[in-house]
Image (spheres, rainbow, N blue to C red):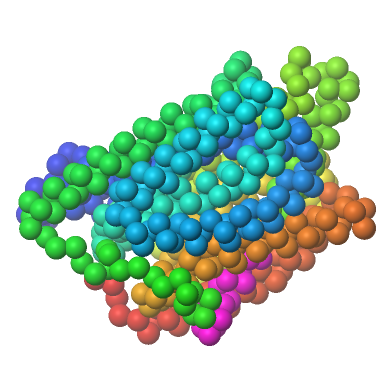
Amino acid sequence: MATPESNNRSSLDRFLGVFADVHSGEGLTALLLALNVFLILMAYYILKPVREALILGEGSAELKTYMSAGQVMVLAFVVPLYARLVARQPRMRLINIVTAFFTACLVVFYFLAQVGVSLAIPFFIWIGVFSMMIVAQFWSFANVIYDKAEGERLFAIVGFGASLGAVMGARVADRLIEPFGIYQLLLLGAAVLGGQVLLTNYVDRREREHQLARKTAVSPSKTAKAKHSESFALVFRTRYLLLMAAMLMLANWVNTTGEYILGNIVKHHAGDLIAAGQGGGLTEGQIIGDFYSKYFTYVNVLSLVLQLFVVSRVVKYLGVAWAVMILPCISLGAYNVLAFIPTLTFVLTAKVAENSTDYSLNNTVRNMLFLPCTYEEKFSAKQAIDSFFVRMGDVLSAALVFFGTNIMQLEAQTFAAVNAVLVLFWLVFAWQVGRIYAKRTAASPAHA
């Protein structure tokens, strides 16, 4: 039977209701936020092939892995500065300043490239900081726009915009990198970011006017901030959070080492093509960039399909406690295969399967794990886990690659075997996290 609320829904509300529980009048804001994050992810995936072409073309797969440690050191300096900016600036001024800074950096990188400055290391570190801060900033903005109940119903639509933007960005880069070269993509990324921040300002004005029209006060959940000084204490004194931190650190360790395996094989493949005269007139950097453009496209298309048609059903029928174990099971199978067959085709297939599941199912479930947490755990502890512990996985991967390549002289297939062992520990932590999640949700009241 139709309810009065369902009868008042617009055509847009009803259409989006196919994918999520959209109430009357909510469709347009959800769509605008989806478009907002669509532009952010589009810009990022336009720039990712540039990163790969520079770091692998000018450097090596080993250098790429080591630079992850550099990103951690830069973030340790930048994040406190960002926190001070958050405390001193209204949210839209904060967003405008940060986005303008990153956009200006792209223009500066472009002009530095024109005068022959090597960009491999600074751009790799920059995009690592950019990808964390700009995406996190958007989700902070979305969290201000929506309260908890709204976010639980509507973030699925917003997340679809992120997945679609990643697909579109990778596809645009794939089409443009050969005819225009890698550096022109820097200016395109800057233009997309400029459009995104204009849209953010529009959404903010629209929502403020909407709230004033309804005479609705902003709830504490929309304005409260987590205390950064308490982040690590919360993690270390709470077994559930500590297990989650260890699980995500291991997951990133495995994934980053897998990216090294892929990069190593791709670089050798590009070099072999050039040596054999089969490069089609392309430079090694263009071949690498072209491969990664296609690779990111495959990952994001499959991720989009999984997000639309698989994720909600897995969570509904298996539950979060089992869903959190699916990605490590896929990784275990993938790296066991690569330990014996380290070919480009197999490593591409393995990484597409792993990353598409990570970006869809695992990313959704990863955020669901905080549902039975307290307010401080959701904000303060999550900040520590998502930044420090996840990036520590990158550092551990860099140490593994350094030790494996410089001391042990390991081949790609041996790194795959090491990854398979690490995944076993990841599975144990995932199982423990799932058990505690089930206990916490069973003891927690249902969400409103």
Of 10 and 212, which appears nearest the observer?
212
The residue at 55%/62% (across/down) is 387
Name the residue located 79 percent from the left edge and 40 percent from the top edge. 60
**Magenta segment boundaries in residue numbering:** 235-250
Q: Which quarter of the picture shows residue 421?
A: bottom right
Question: Where is residue 203 shown, x and y percent of the image?
Answer: 25, 43
| Residue 153 position (above or below residue 290) | below
Residue 42 magenta = no
Magenta segment includes 248: yes
Judge whether 420 appears above or below 233 on screen.
above
Location of the C terminus by quadrant is bottom left
Estimate the x, y position of residue 435 in percent, counting from the top left: 52, 79
**x, y (%) of residue 45?**
54, 37
Q: Nearer the viewer, residue 110 or 205?
A: 110
Question: Along the horizontal axis of the image, is 3 left or right of 33?
Answer: left
Q: Nearer the viewer, residue 118 or 353?
A: 118
The answer to whether one can see residue 15 in this image is no
Q: Residue at x 71, y 32 (%)?
A: 118
